[in-house]
Image (tube, grey):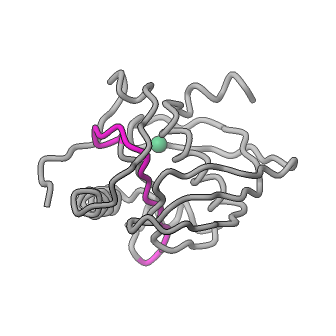
Amino acid sequence: MNKKLNVVTVPNPLLHQKSAKVKKFDKSLKDLALAMVEIMKANNGVGLSAVQVGKLIKLTVVEYIPQNMDEESKKALKAHRPFPLTFLVNPKITKFSKTTHIGDEGCLSLPEVEVPVKRAVEINVLAQDLEGNRIKIRARDYHARILQHEIDHLNGILITDKIKNN
Ligand SMILES: [Zn+2]
């Protein structure tokens, strides 16, 4: 297990770089993914991308299970529906709903920052799992928002880059 991983924060230039496509679905990918889950949970996050631990590869984990959060996060997120732990390798959004919603977002790479971001309410995502199998996800509301946020990370885009586009 990779114990030396820390969350990368601004102004680290890695955060504005594009991550590379994953081609090898090996043990090191799984080890990284599991280490990311630990970091995400330790920080009460609901999503984390590999670039945020300094690895420029297209790997994202998301999970929102209220029971796993601290009291403050539970309260802040209580309006949202839970979504299960999912590993997304090489994710791509194949469809955005025309309907959008503006909501406040934070980011583990931008401590203390919370900004309103416009997102599609519903999206379809094509990705691979840690074995390389194709997966399709249809997400809406908060789940869709978090996936759009994480997939932005893989393209070097932060929430502070989005606000001017609202
Ligand atoms: Zn983020």
The answer to which of 44 and 144 lies nearer the viewer is 144
The answer to which of 99 and 134 lies nearer the viewer is 134
Check the image and name the residue furthest to the right: 98
Rendered residue at 31%/60% (across/down): 33
In the depicted structure, whether residue 131 falls above or below residue 102 = below
Span colored in magenta: 51-67
- Where residue 124 sits, quadrant-wise, is bottom right
Q: In which quarter of the image is the N terminus?
A: bottom left
- Where residue 26 sits, quadrant-wise, is bottom left
Rendered residue at 75%/30% (across/down): 166
Check the image and name the residue furthest to the front: 23
The answer to which of 64 and 79 lies nearer the viewer is 64
Rendered residue at 37%/43% (across/down): 57
In the depicted structure, whether residue 164 falls above or below residue 40 = above
Numbered label tally: 0
- Give coordinates of residue 154: x percent, y percent: 48, 39
Residue 14 magenta: no
The answer to whether residue 83 is left or right of residue 25 is: right
- Give coordinates of residue 10: x percent, y percent: 37, 26
- Give coordinates of residue 150: x percent, y percent: 52, 47
Check the image and name the residue furthest to the bottom: 67
Rendered residue at 78%/47% (across/down): 101
- Give coordinates of residue 34: x percent, y percent: 28, 64
The answer to whether residue 146 is left or right of residue 108 is: right
- Where residue 21 sits, quadrant-wise, is top left
